[in-house]
Image (cartoon, rainbow, N blue to C red):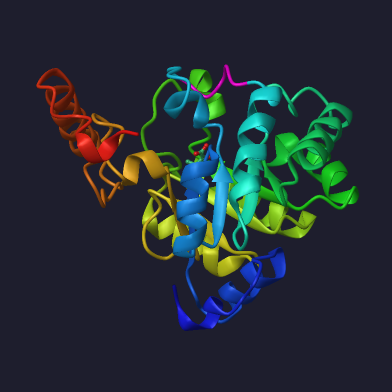
Amino acid sequence: MSASTSEIKRITTHVIQAMKNRGEKIAMLTAYDFSMARILDEAGIDILLVGDSASNVMAGHETTLPITLDQMIYHAQSVVRAVHRAMVVVDMPFGSYQSNSEIALKSAIRIMKESGAHAVKLEGGAEVEESIQRILMAGIPVMGHLGLTPQSIYKFGTYTVRAKQEAEAQKLHADAKLLDSLGCFALVLEKIPARLAKEVSKSIEIPTIGIGAGPDADGQVLVTHDMLGITKDFKPRFLRRYLELFDAIGEATQRYISDVKGRDFPNEHEQY
Ligand code: KIV
C-alpha cells in the first residue's frame, strides 16, 4: 500500500478522485465472500468489486447473465460485513437495469439498502444514459464499464479485444466522455487497446480502471480468483498470476486425504 493512502480510514469516491489527481494508481480486485474480502481489505486494496463474474467464478455458469439481483445482494452483504477500509462496488446484474430507468433505480436502491455497499457498477454508455442519470440523482455513486462488456457476450459473439476499429474506438471515447459528464465516479475499461485506454484516461476527469487495457489506465482490476490461480485454465495475455492456488489447494487436499486414510490425522494433540 502506498504511503499516501495508508492512513486513510475509509476509501470514498473523493479519495479515488484525489488518487487520480495526484497520479496514484488505484488497485481494485473482485470479492464475493466474507473470508476473501477480509484478506483483501486487510492487505490494503482500494476498491472491492462484487462483480457479476461471481456467476462464473462462484456458481460455475459460462456467462455472467444468469446471476440474479438477489444473489448479487447476498454476495455483497457478505463482502460488506468483512470490510473496514475498502470501497465496495456492486455490479448490477443483467436484466436489473436495461429495461427502463425506473427498474434500474429500484435495483440500485435494493443493492444499497440491503447490502450496505458504497456504489454500483453497470455496463454500457449512451444506451443506459437515462438509468445512470436516475441512479445518480438518487445519490448513488455509479461506476461505468465500457469495452468488453460481458453481459453483451451474445451480441459480440466472442471475448476478444474490443474497439480495435476506428468507429468502435470513437463510440467508446464518446461514451467515456458522456459517463464523465453525467457524474459517474469511475470507469472500467475492459480489453481494449492500450493506446485507446491511455487517450480516454487523459481526456476525462474521472479515474479509469483497466482490465486488459494496458498500463495507462488510472487503476487496474483483476478477478481475484484469476490472479490467485484458482481458476485453472483461464490464462489471457493481460492476466498476471500471483499464486497457483489451484495446484496448492489440490496438493494440500491430497495430503489431508492421505493423513486421514493413513490414520495420521488426528493425532494425540488434535483431540479432546
Ligand atoms: O464482474 C467482474 O468481475 C467485472 C470485472 C472484470 C471488471 O466486471
Residue 50 in the image: state x and y as whole percent: 58, 41
Image quarter (top left, top right, bottom left or bottom right) of the C terminus: top left
User: Compared to 181, does 76 lie above or below?
Assistant: above
Residue 150 in view (yes/no): yes
Residue 66 magenta-drawn?
yes
Residue 106 magenta-drawn?
no
Identify which residue, 134 or 49, lies in the foreground: 49
Position of 95 with respect to 257 (left or right) is right
Position of 261 with respect to 27 (left or right) is left
Residue 245 in the image: state x and y as whole percent: 25, 40
Image quarter (top left, top right, bottom left or bottom right) of the N terminus: bottom left
Residue 217 in the image: state x and y as whole percent: 47, 62
Which residue is rendered at x = 48% and y = 20% of the image?
59
User: Compared to 244, does 98 lie above or below?
Assistant: above
Which residue is rendered at x = 75% and y = 29% of the image?
97
Tell me the quarter of the picture where residue 115 sits: top right
User: Compared to 86, does 49 lie above or below?
Assistant: above
Tell me the quarter of the picture where residue 19 sits: bottom right
Identify which residue, 209 or 167, lies in the foreground: 209
Highlighted range, magenta: 63-67
Report the number of numbered marks. Answer: 0
Residue 93 in the image: state x and y as whole percent: 65, 28
User: Compared to 229, does 22 lie above or below?
Assistant: below
Position of 203 with respect to 199 (left or right) is right
Residue 164 in view (yes/no): no
Identify which residue, 107 or 73, lies in the foreground: 73
Magenta stretch prevailing secondary structure? loop
Identify which residue, 27 or 82, lies in the foreground: 82
Which residue is rendered at x = 70% and y = 64% of the image?
13
